[in-house]
Image: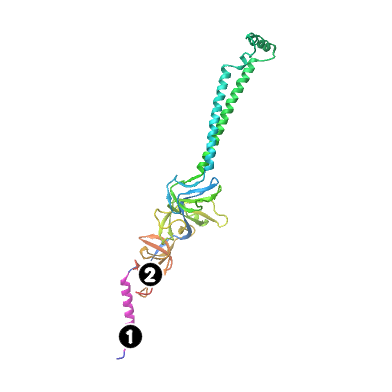
Amino acid sequence: MRVSPWLFATAIFAGTTSAALAAAGEYQTAVITAAQVGHTSVVGGTVIPYKEVNLAAQIPGQVTFIAGSEGDSFEGGAILVQIDDSQIQAQRRAALADISNAEAAVRNAQVQYSRELWSPRSNSPNTMPGMGAPGMFDQFFTRNASNFMGRSDTGLERQADLYAQGSGVNQAESKLLQAHAQLEALDAKLRDAQLAAPFDGMIVKKLVETGDTVQPGTPLLQFAHTTYLRIRADVPVRLVAGLEKGMMVPARLDAGGVEVKARVAQIYPMADQTRHTVTVKFDLPKGIPGGPGMYAEVQIPDPGESSQDLPAIPQASIVWRGSLPNVFVLHEGAPSLRVVRIGSPVGDGRVSILSGVKTGEQVIVNPPAGLVSGVR
């Protein structure tokens, strides 16, 4: 039986249309609509710890103790690194002996001063042989006659003796203070021999091992507070005008393409003279995946551009393949995988798309696992 070409073409068209409708009915789809959003620019940055310090050696010596390895957490005040301090301990014991000697010298000087104050040597009779009459005569007559004739001054001699004994007390006390200062300097060195955690955090990089000999200034550890993380980005100067401290902006992390809201925490006051960018730090929510060092993107509003109409799709239609966002679009009844560039959220669980799809197309919402482009 011969079939008319017109009837054959009609049958093929009807079969194709039915297949397309059947394919559309197999998935939950949504029509891509247009949304008016402000123009934004994507700036790349790096995730950094909330706080980070580099611990360096303060004294020369051999490393005798390291608390842990990379990833180990410690509370503030915990000892992280110990440098050999046996020589400083010996010097400290010698300083304690100097303090004991200086204290004895101070006591002796105070006794000599009290003796001069209450029993002046200038008033004591001279020790002479025989009976005590010559000495008494010299004490009561000869000394007074000498003072009268101007050859001596007993009062001045007494004041000079008191001053000399008082100077001895001051010198002894000064030596005692000097010994205490030496002890304090050695105690400071002993504290420098131990490097403690300045805050709660973890070791992110260990630069020495037990047994290494270090000099002052040698880097030992990198210690960071990683409970809270930040994004550090170099923002072009023209975009900084659209930012202010405390402002919330969309951000996307390289770990699974997670999208979060980041808060502007700090805007540096000066721009880089070579790249003409300003460093900006953004606070991230607690508990995000990944860690310091990973790549992140921040969407910053462009104050010099007006709003525009962009395609908007449901957030549930986005599929992450690696670190790239993708969507399945129904094309001629079959799913077609496309790589898209995500914009900012527009509300109602939708997100704007900068490139990859067009308004009016149909996207598959919550695509099933294992869905392949071009196969129903």
For label 1, the SS is: helix
Give how far across and how far down residue 33 sits, in percent: 38, 66
User: Could you give the CA–CA distance between mark 1 and mark 2, rounded to whole angstroms?
Assistant: 32 Å
- Examine the structure image and report whether residue 12 is included in the region drawn in magenta: yes
Query: What residue do we see at 32% from left, 72% from top?
Result: 24
Give how far across and how far down residue 184 sits, in percent: 53, 37
Q: Which of 287 and 38 is in front in this view?
A: 287
Question: Residues at badges 1 and 2 in contact (C-beta under 8 Å)?
Answer: no
Give how far across and how far down residue 288 sits, in percent: 40, 56
> Tag 2: Cα neighbours inside 10 Å, few (<14), some, or many (≥20)?
many
For label 2, the SS is: strand
Q: Nearer the viewer, residue 356 or 113?
A: 113
Residue at the limit of the structure toward the bottom, as seen here: 1
Is residue 174 shown to the viewer in this render?
A: yes
- Amino acid type of the residue that numbered disc 1 sits on in the rendered structure: Phe
Query: What residue do we see at 54% from left, 42% from top?
Result: 87
Magenta range: 3-27
Residue 287 found in image quarter: bottom left
Q: Which of marks 1 and 2 is in front?
A: 2
Give how far across and how far down residue 253 sits, in percent: 43, 59
Q: In which quadrant of the rendered image does the N terminus lie? A: bottom left
Q: In this view, does 95 lie to the left or right of 247?
A: right
> Tag 1: Cα neighbours inside 10 Å, few (<14), some, or many (≥20)?
few
Q: Nearer the viewer, residue 149 or 210?
A: 210
Give me the disc on residue 8.
1
Q: Is residue 305 left or right of residue 115?
A: left
Q: Nearer the viewer, residue 178 or 92?
A: 92
Query: What residue do we see at 55% from left, 27% from top?
Result: 106
Q: Name the residue under label 2.
A: 328
- Examine the structure image and report whether residue 216 is included in the region drawn in magenta: no
